[in-house]
Amino acid sequence: MSYQTNRRSFLIAGGVTALASTRVLGANDTLRIGVIGAGGRMRSLLDCAERVGPCQFVAVSDVYKPHRDAVLDRSKGLATTHLDYREVLDKDVDAVIIASPDHWHVRMAVDALAAGKDVYLEKPVTHTIEEGATLTHAVRSSKQILQCGLQQRSWTHFRNAVDLIQAGSLGRVLQVRTYWWQNYQRAFQREAKPVEIADLDWKLWLGGAPDQEFNEEKFYHWRWFWNFGGGAMTDLFTHWIDVVHWAMKSDQPKDAYMLGDKYFFEQWDCPDTVQAALRYPGFDVVYEGMMASSIDDGGLEFRGTEATLKIDRGSMSVYREGVGGKDNPVMTEHSFRDGTVSHMQNFFECVKNRKEPNAPVEAGVAAARAGHIANLAYRRDGQVTWPLKSS
């Protein structure tokens, strides 16, 4: 069976029969969940799902046996286990959660939608710019719910920050600074056990990516190789630029500039040290980060003519021009709950009430597209104008 991907296979949804679930869900009904891609991120998502509940993990697919076994254990032996994700779609499940490597996202989501399943799709929802139209068409031509994994949209203090910005409390916002520093040196020290090759279907893991020999670095850190991910700009920046799009009501950059270097992790395709700038109509967005230092973690600063709002996943603060200075915010709000829990709760509610989720497909596509455009600038000598001009 071929797992090569092309546009036509997306549009015909891989031959999966488009039969919507006929089960009518009530407020207290247990959701039957299919798990697709059961690595580290999925473990966190399933933790959130169990906190929201009630739900049951009915089936799991992953190309690596220890990942499948972990979900089987979590389900107390009730889940069926599969190599091929399409077998999960054949099960009686209400929804699927997809947390595979990026290059599988659109194909799996389109097949799930065509099979009548609601979908929670991890970000970035696309691996290429072109996939955005395919995914949007699949969602909007179906009756299914798709929640993009942009959990800030359900995080209370982020929602309050957006309300403040859109109400004009900062004056005119002319620049947004975003940043995210992580330390993969320390992550390597905590890395998972060496891969048991006999338990891994590497060819299936590759899917539509170019054929290549197994590489443990690519298996564990696939986000940093172009065949499977897009580095910091699609893994990290995607979260922050979505907040910018949401708050500023503008999601199409006009120009993108990016400097990137592989100063530390030379084995990667993607740069480990990045400075980027995107120009939108009336304001600029800048991003900086590196992957060998994590003291400041990640966050955003909306700089307006009357005030500046600084926000991260722990809190937000507003600083008024001429009042108090940079060390004395005029207001501060702290977060006391992981927004992913609220985001999963919103997804479960939408599965039951059929309302639009907090992070619809258009938001996910736009956030991923911004990262793709920045990466395009990096690979085109540091600059690109969008949309691309025909040659």
Image (cartoon, grey):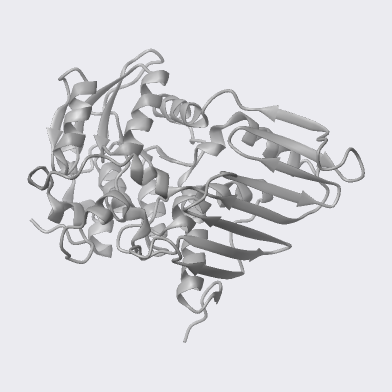
Measuring from the top left, give residue 299's x and y in whole percent.
Answer: 61, 45
Measuring from the top left, give residue 82's x and y in whole percent.
Answer: 13, 37
Location of residue 354 with respect to 101 vertically, above or below: above
One can see residue 332 in this view: yes
Q: Farthest residue in the right direction?
A: 322
One can see residue 92 in this view: no
Residue found at x 41% / y 15%: 27
Measuring from the top left, give residue 46's x and y in whole percent.
Answer: 34, 28
Q: Farthest residue in the top direction?
A: 28
Q: Is residue 362 left or right of residue 75?
A: right
- Residue nearest the viewer, comparing 329 with 244: 329
Q: Is residue 324 left or right of residue 383?
A: right
- Res 309 quadrant in image: top right
Residue found at x 83% / y 33%: 330
Q: Farthest residue in the bottom direction?
A: 391
- Residue nearest the viewer, comparing 244 with 177: 177
Location of residue 172 with respect to 50 vertically, above or below: below
Residue found at x 27% / y 55%: 217
- Res 287 quadrant in image: bottom right
Indicate the quadrant containing the N terminus: top left, top right, bottom left or bottom right.
bottom left
The total number of labels drawn is 0
Measuring from the top left, give residue 250's x and y in whole percent.
Answer: 64, 55
Q: Is residue 247 left or right of residue 62?
A: right
- Residue nearest the viewer, comparing 187 with 322: 187
